Image: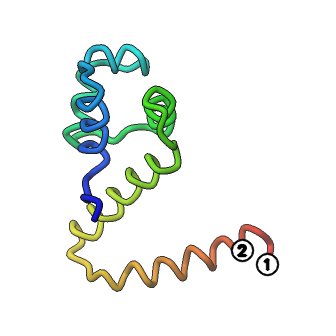
Amino acid sequence: MKKTNTFGEHLRNLREESSLTLKFVSEQIGIDTSLLAKIERNERPPTKLIIKHIGKFFKVDEKDLLNSFLSDQIAYKIIDEEADLSVLKVAEKKVKYLKNIQNGK
């Protein structure tokens, strides 16, 4: 079974498995070293552009990285609101509904 981790933990694992420093990776993806460190510690969210650069640099699927990041945001929101996981089922239905509206159906 694959270990579940946060976006930041996943990013840190990618970097450490490649034996790369924060400074080197941050230079390669075009951000400040302290920002990369904060992203790895889940203290700052990455932008879509940063996620794109990370995916390109580490040769990993950008969509997988974005899913990891977005799932963190959803999980934190559910925890912050002390909500029940049933909210995910409702949200799934609403996503389908809203996509239909956007697609003119």
Residue 9's x, y, as percent?
24, 44
Q: Nearer the viewer, residue 100 or 62?
A: 62
Residue 62's x, y, as percent?
51, 42
What secondary structure is marked by label 1? loop
Q: Amino acid at mark 1?
A: Lys
Render colour scheme: rainbow
Residue 33's x, y, as percent?
27, 19
What secondary structure is marked by label 2? helix
**For mark 1, does the 10 Å Cα neighbourhood hold few (<14), some (14 to 19), or many (20 or more) residues?**
few
Which image quarter: residue 70?
bottom left
Residue 64's x, y, as percent?
47, 50
The residue lying furthest to the front in this view is 1
Q: Nearer the viewer, residue 102 or 16?
A: 16
Apparent side of residue 94 relative to residue 83 in the rendered image (left or right): right
Q: Which residue is mark 2?
A: 101
Give the numbered dot on residue 105. 1
Quadrant containing the N terminus is bottom left
Q: Distance of mark 2 from mark 1, alpha carbons?
A: 6 Å
Q: Amino acid at mark 2?
A: Ile
Question: In percent of the image, x 29 and y 64: which residue is there?
Answer: 75
Quadrant containing the C terminus is bottom right
Question: Do the residues under discs 2 and 1 have CB atoms within 8 angstroms?
Answer: yes
